[in-house]
Image: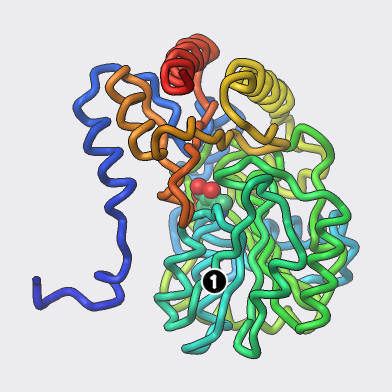
Amino acid sequence: MNSFIAQRALDIDASGIRKVFDLAAKLKDPINLSIGQPDFDVPEALKERAIDAIRSGKNRYTPTQGVGGLLDKVKAKVSHDTGWSDPAALILSGTSAGLMLAMFATLNPGDEVLFLDPYFVMYKHLPKLCGAVPVAVDSYPDFRFHAERIEAAITPRTKMLILCSPNNPTGITLTQAELEAAAAIAKKHHLLVISDEIYDAFCYGPHLSVAKLLPDQCILLKGYSKTYGMTGWRLGYAAAGGEAKAVIEQMTKLQQYTFVCAPSMVQYAALDTVAGDTEGHAGGVDMTPQIDAYRRKRDRVVEGLGELLEINAPGGAFYAFPKVPQKVTATEFVARAIERNVLIIPGNVFSARDTHFRLSYATSDEKLDRGILILRELAAELSR
Ligand SMILES: Cc1ncc(COP(=O)(O)O)c(C=O)c1O
């Protein structure tokens, strides 16, 4: 063991996903259905604004909380979307930064953090970095919010509940009734709810949020990464109302001593184009065609795999989480898919179970169709 390395780093096990990437590295031109980002590029209007910002010298530190105009637009949008009056907000280097800062600002050692299994992997690792305890609550087989299971997992140490809708890795979107049940539990036990809404634009029905129901105890996390194909640009925001505004204040302080600020030119690019967008196409940047294309890809996946594999039709994001045939584990199924040049991710990367796989349909229709065909053949062989 290397004596330079801290235990908290060693405690994070990334071997599952690394194995997949190692196998993938050997493939030539794979059908890659494992990617967690859109296959479309940043809209030209945004690129132009970022270039203009760089050329006009917007290259220095910005205020920690974000450039004023952007912050104002974000707050106005949050008020519009949630009904919160006078929310607090913080511009972030991506939603990931928001998850990290929110946890560092609120979790004491031993505090427990609830979220549904399957989960986005950061939900498991970030609490541990704070000395807190991640508690993944099984949501199989339908990946829905089962209030009674969440209630059963609550202890006097439970402090936080993370919701992610639309969900990574399942694509499930929560219903109004589920959000109301979650809000009722949060109120009853005075939990802080983190609502991770990074996939809000990728909703194939209306986007519903728990934020409206929790004006005092919700940290809303939103990001521009996925919506505008700008995952490398690093921009998102956190917002809160009521008692939770104090959390944003602490997150801002922590940002000052960690990330410092979100990338300046990206903040200015967003300020002039997409920030404040309440309809999905502010500043001449309309993502409707891209989102419609993703809806059709979702339909292709459900139609193509649905008769052979158990699959909960995703309501959003760009993932599906089908069950593998009983004969094999997900890890074995994925290894066989990779032998046939199709890259997917085994469920145990996101879950205590190894029975499903994550398929990302963020790729061309041509590749998606080829991938679906190969997965159908594999499923049929293993179901015999
Ligand atoms: C559920 C979820 N939350 C947060 C993130 C982080 O996104 P970013 O830091 O790019 O805003 C991702 C990225 O994959 C995600 O899937």
Q: Is residue 306 above or below residue 220?
A: above
Secondary-structure class at tag 1? strand
Is residue 293 visible to the viewer in this orientation of the structure? no
Picture quadrant where residue 238 is located:
bottom right
Whole-percent x, y for residue 208 in the image = 82, 49
283 or 373: which is nearer to us?
Answer: 373
Q: Is residue 340 above or below residue 169?
A: above
The residue pinned by badge 1 equals 135
Left or right, 37 with respect to 223, comes to: left
At horizontal 65% and vertical 60% (from top left) the residue drawn is: 221
- Three-letter amino acid code at disc 1? Val
Q: How many marks?
A: 1
Is residue 163 visible to the viewer in this orientation of the structure? yes
Whole-percent x, y for residue 304 in the image = 60, 16
Q: Residues within 10 Å of mark 1 (few under 14, many from 20)?
A: many
Left or right, 19 with respect to 112, comes to: left
Picture quadrant where residue 258 is located:
bottom left
At horizontal 60% and vertical 59% (from top left) the residue drawn is: 138
At horizontal 58% and vertical 83% (from top left) the residue drawn is: 106
Whole-percent x, y for residue 239 in the image = 71, 67
170 or 318: which is nearer to us?
Answer: 170
Q: Is residue 365 above or below residue 66?
A: above
